[in-house]
Image: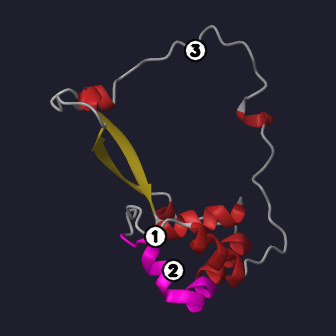
Amino acid sequence: MKARFFPKAEADLSDITEIAFQEESFPPNLIIINQIATGEEVKAILKSRKPFKAPGIDSIPNSFLQAMGQRMADAIAALATACWKIGHYPQQFKNARTIALRKPGNQIYSDPGAWRLIALLSTIGKVIKTLIA
């Protein structure tokens, strides 16, 4: 089953002549100047989230963050602002828990194609990414 979800493929890159997307052609990292997240922005994001979606690697469901109210929203806003000021997005927000879900309508689940993989990211990390967007 592992080979089905994670096939080993060697890419032949010898025919690529376009150089517009070389590493040097990209601008430096996005710099956010004097950006401050507010608790109201975070609270609006939390309100728009479905409360019972599967939590990520941090095991914090959206319903918990929503139930914590303004103090939690203010804390997440302070964390986002600190991340922007120092220019660092913590690794724990990038880590994901990957799970396999059955595709609906399939009767034979011994076939790896009857499953789909989803990656569950940190709930707080997703809120911060939404603030950035």
Callout 1 crowding tier (Cα within 10 Å): few <14, some 14–19, many ≥20: some
By secondary structure, the bulk of the magenta-drawn segment is best described as helix
- Residue 51, labelled with which disc? 1
Q: Residue at x 71, y 35 (%)?
A: 23
Q: Which residues are magenta?
A: 59-75
Real-space Cα separation, disc 3 to disc 1, in angstroms: 44 Å
Label 2, on which residue? 66
- Above or below, 90 relative to 68: above
Based on the displayed image, in which of its 4 quarters is residue 89 positioned?
bottom right
Of residues 107 and 19, the one nearer the viewer is: 107
Q: Are marks 1 and 2 in contact (CB under 8 Å)?
A: yes
Q: Quadrant of the C terminus?
A: bottom right
Q: Which mark is residue 22?
A: none
The nearer-to-camera label among 3 and 2 is 2
Real-space Cα separation, disc 1 to disc 2, in angstroms? 8 Å
Q: Secondary structure at mark 3?
A: loop
Q: Which residue is mark 3?
A: 13
Q: Residue at x 63, y 70 (%)?
A: 45
